[in-house]
Image (cartoon, grey):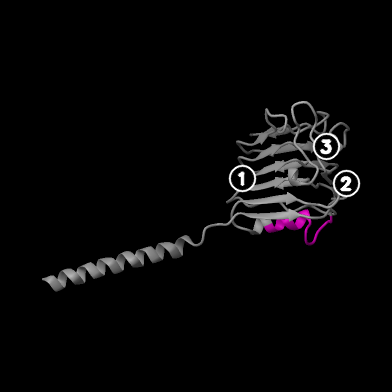
Amino acid sequence: MILTRRVLSALVLAGLLLAGLLLALCSGPALADTTFTVKNAKNGGPGSLRSAIQKTNAAPGEDTIRFNSPGMVDSISPRSLLPEITEITEAVTINDYTQRGERPAPSATDAVLKIRINGAKAGAGANGLEITAYNSTIRGLGINRFKANGILVEGDGNKIEGNYIGTDQPGTLDHANGKVGVRVVDRTDNTLGGPSPANPTSSPTTRRTASRSRGS
């Protein structure tokens, strides 16, 4: 009887160890957060915005795209459509306020933005940024002169804040995109701008650059 109890105890312990091992193998490693840095205004290749978006889409975890371009003011001029931001399992943040010399708008003065995405050469039907991801944030960018929309949102729970869309860099002159500044298509819980001076997404006109949403 004593031997039987010992055998049963050993079998139970072995079973628990095996279950723990199987759980660890099935769950896999924790997803790591990754930061990708835009270092130049080139159309593609290492250090470009295009490359950073491609790497973000391929990487697991919540990712951030930051900017550290040597130019105090850089204009990124895509020669074709930029990749969609498609990582739907984890959030993506594109934060241009990481660029040297930039700052959100304080209470009494305008924001200072140093990076703009100029879509004049991106081709017919091009949107500035296309987001099919969920719970992502686009912050502190200038986006203008695309033939279609400045930003097209086709995911839920995204935030578009502190950008100059369809304007010049100071946010005063009309450099309109072809359709609207931000278009949200049949999605929910997306936020455009916000109550803080640091958050509004600026557009100087309503005909071409004002935010428009449908089903949001």
Which of pointers 1 and 2 lies earlier in the amino acid sequence? 2
User: What amino acid type is highlighted by mark number 3?
Assistant: Gly
User: Where is mark 2, residue-wise?
Assistant: 120
Residue in the image at 83% along x and 39% along y: 177
User: Where is mark 1, residue-wise?
Assistant: 134
- Residue 79 horizontal side relative to residue 90, left or right: right
Whether the residues at callouts 3 and 2 have beta carbons within 8 Å, the answer is: no
Residue in the image at 79% along x and 36% along y: 164
| Residue range of the region highlighted in magenta in the rendering | 42-55
The answer for how far apart the CA atoms under marks 3 and 2 are is 12 Å
Dot 1 lies on which element? loop
Dot 3 lies on which element? loop
Instruction: Find out whether residue 50 is within the magenta segment.
Output: yes
The answer for how far apart the CA atoms under marks 3 and 1 are is 24 Å
Dot 2 lies on which element? loop
Residue 40 figure quarter: bottom right
Q: Position of residue 212 (x, y in %)?
A: 73, 32
